[in-house]
Amino acid sequence: MNEQKLLIIDDDDMIGQTMSYIARSIGIEAHATSQPDEFFEQVESWKPTHIALDLVMPDMDGVEVLVELAKRECSAGIIITSGVGPRVLDAARRSAGEHGLNIIGVLSKPFSPALLRQMLTTEVNAVDGSGFASTRGKGRDIEVGELAEAIENGEIELAYQPKVWCNSGLLAGFEALARWRSPQRGMVMPGQFIPVAESGDLIKRLTLEVMDLAMEWMSESLDDSQADEDDWLSMSINISALTLDDPHFINHVTTQCKRFGIAPGRLIFELTETSAMQDPVTSLDLLTRLRMKGFQLSIDDFGTGYSSMLQLVRLPFSEIKIDRSFVMSASRSTESRAVIRSIIELGRSLGLRTTAEGVEDAETLEYLKELRCELAQGYLISKPLSGAEASSWAENG
Ligand code: C2E
Ligand code: CA
Ligand code: CA
């Protein structure tokens, strides 16, 4: 295991010392400072694997520090500390997450040493020794050409995450999630290569590949030919907004549906509105045509900045997916529960199905049932599975 190093920035020297003491007691090297200059100098030269950051300091505010860390592409595990209320801490955590920082926990003051120890030990293995994102292949060093070749070589695979009906717990379908099994890099996650594909024109090619793989798997593993329309298992596929102006897309899916004998109604295209959706007219056309052909359309990551109310009303969606950041925090955040409740009500009033993704605990699933949310997806139910594992899930329920 890599050597672990904790860097603390806190204007209160006592807190810095206490945290250092706790870290050292479990074999983690620690260094504390109250000076931003010294802090950033240490981030660069000492390369901590963990950072504990006080959100409220007299000379510099913690949010600025987070922004600066994001600019430097710091991938250390970050623990946010502060005496401010849980609501502000939660907002800071979300904003840091959106900046791509690796937030491993929020510690309100006065903090519990046990909780700090837990954060330092449980998440410690997830962070590599360099403290910087580049060596984790965050995407910057993946080249479009390399990825294009990988697609041609059949190195893209799919993981399938089950989606269940909240009220019965029965399987409703799967979401296809792309993975790149690279002989050189090992298993690469979509967060690392989707942005690369999107930066070139490669995302269109990748979308078609994912679709083909998903449909082929469906036709082999989910034989629904005997089932009622109500019992059909669905397949959700993520579509980048950049794919929407691809004229081949709609022909390709309809052709493939015929080829594999899959009813269009079983396919759900999940869309996240991004700033990239530049041509609202073309996308409205395409989405409307897809719906007319019977495909389903889901607005992904709903509740976040990009997937907004405006999009929901303007475009012909059939499903809302509540962003996992709200669902994952539901059991500890009143605010998240309020957001979930109002999204479910919104869905109901617009006649859409609602899926909650990121369900990690039984309490949250219970809450979703109470609210009559239709569908749930998340680690509590199942992690994304290999094709073979997903087939047996489908067989055995
Ligand atoms: P997404 O569409 O929001 O997909 C759900 C992500 O949440 C998946 O991450 C899944 O593994 C993760 N997840 C599911 N349940 C839980 C849970 O209970 N807790 C937590 N913490 N996480 C959970 P994954 O597979 O890393 O995918 C990340 C994103 O990459 C996806 O987010 C999607 O936006 C994108 N993506 C994946 N496959 C494709 C693809 O084929 N095409 C495009 N355009 N984007 C894709
Ligand atoms: Ca999705
Ligand atoms: Ca999502």
Image: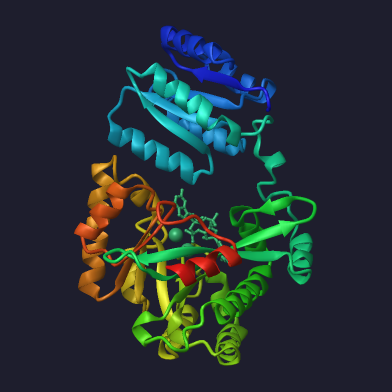
Using the rendered view, name the quadrant where residue 164 is placed: bottom left
Image point 26% across, 57% down: which residue? Answer: 368
Viewer-nearest residue: 319 or 162: 162
- Is the image coloured rainbow, by chain, by secondary structure, or in one colour? rainbow
Image quadrant occupied by the N terminus: top right
In the rendered view, tell whether residue 115 sits above or below residue 280. Answer: above
Question: Residue, x 57% and y 13% (percent of image)?
Answer: 31
**Whole-percent x, y for residue 91 in the image:** 35, 39
Indicate whether 205 appears above or below 274.
below
Q: Position of residue 209 (x, y in %)?
A: 65, 74
Residue 1 vs residue 317, the one in the foreground: 1
Q: Residue at x 47, y 28 (%)?
A: 79
Compared across the picture, whether 2 is left or right of 237 comes to: right
Q: Seen in the image, is 78 located left or right of residue 180? A: left
Q: Quadrant of the C terminus?
A: bottom left
Please provide percent x and percent y for residue 227: 41, 86
Q: Is residue 112 placed above or below 156 in the rendered structure?
A: above
Q: Quadrant of ligand 3?
A: bottom left
Q: Relative to 309, is 238 on the left or the right?
A: right
Q: Residue at x 56, y 20 (%)?
A: 6
